[in-house]
Image (tube, grey):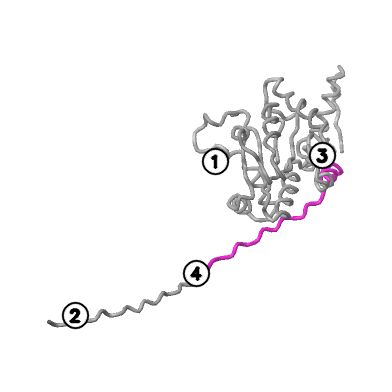
Amino acid sequence: MAKPAPKKKLNIVASTVKETVARPVPLNLKKIEALTESQQKFFESFDKDYNVILSGSAGAGKTFIALAKALELVIKSKFKKRLVIVRSVVPTRDMGFLPGTQGEKEAAYTVPYISIVNDLFGDGKAWETLVKKGAIRFITTSYIRGITLNNSVIVVDECQNCNFHELDSIMTRIGDSTRIIFAGDYYQSDFSKNNDRKGILKFFRIIDKLNYFKHIEFTWEDIVRSQIVRDYIMTREIQEREEENGQEPKNQQFLV
């Protein structure tokens, strides 16, 4: 009987495939200088570990400087912290009834923040990169209950559109190693009910009694968006004061 032929040893050599992986380009946050005295007060307060309320005139750069300082802290922590942007969604307060996923529902509200973050880094994909990295999270007050925000820098933007219960819910979400900045203008509220509009004033009265909070008020003198915005808001405030005092608004031009 013939012996079976010996099995041939297969000499398998694992081939090494060199893959060229593009290294991510590091994001460099621009150095932001204060343009007004109120902005400087905010920078100093935040650097001293205060939580801060930025309230007052539109166009004063409140959102811009809040995001700039928040991201600066995130980077200093070597991304152990993250930026959490919170806002209400007036007039469509209950987003559960809107079509689409949560991300699709929130997309329209992230547009200004995408623009600011990309500008702060001088990179058109900075927002996308940081979101993927987990360094930025956007959330609406519709989804904030039941969560705890640890190791975060929270920026509550357009806070004049949060009623008292939403502001209360946000405050009670703050966890360990977390800072918070509120930014908004009472006079730009989208609320139609007076009780909802005044909720923020009640909230501010409580916050103003807490330690480690600074409340910085911005006036028309702090407006940096443009000269026309500055002149308009200044003139509007003068006219509103005249009407409150029962005076006939004067038909005159104000030159700055």
Where, quadrant-wise, is the C terminus in this rendering? Answer: top right
- Residue 150 lies, in percent from the top left, at 67, 43
Magenta portion: prevailing SS class: loop
Where, quadrant-wise, is the N terminus in this rendering? Answer: bottom left
Find out whether the residues at labels 1 and 3 contact each other: C-beta distance under 8 Å: no
Mark 3 neighbour class, 10 Å CA radius: few under 14, some 14 to 19, many 20 or more: some
Give me the C-alpha separation between circle 4 and circle 3: 51 Å
Residue 4 shows which numbered tag?
A: 2
The image quarter in which residue 198 lies: top right
Residue 173 shows which numbered tag?
A: none
Q: In the visual, does 22 lie left or right of 158? A: left
Q: Looking at the image, tell me whether mark 2 or mark 3 is earlier in sequence order.
A: 2
Looking at this rendering, what residue extends furthest in the front direction?
1
Residue 62 in sight from this viewpoint: yes
Give me the C-alpha separation between circle 1 and circle 4: 33 Å
Which residues make up the magenta segment? 20-42
Residue at figure coordinates x 82%, y 24% from the top left = 240
Mark 2 neighbour class, 10 Å CA radius: few under 14, some 14 to 19, many 20 or more: few
Determine whether the residue tagged by mark 2 lies in a helix, strand or loop. loop
- Residue 196 lies, in percent from the top left, at 69, 23
Q: Looking at the image, tell me whether mark 1 or mark 3 is earlier in sequence order.
A: 1
Residue assigned mark 3: 212
Q: Which amino acid does label 1 sit on?
A: Gly
- Residue 210 lies, in percent from the top left, at 81, 33
Q: In the visual, does 22 lie left or right of 211? A: left
Determine whether the residue tagged by mark 1 lies in a helix, strand or loop. helix
Residue at figure coordinates x 39%, y 77% from the top left = 13
Q: Which amino acid does label 3 sit on?
A: Tyr
**28, above or below 190, in the image:** below
Pick the residue in front: 6 or 31.
Answer: 6
Residue assigned mark 4: 19
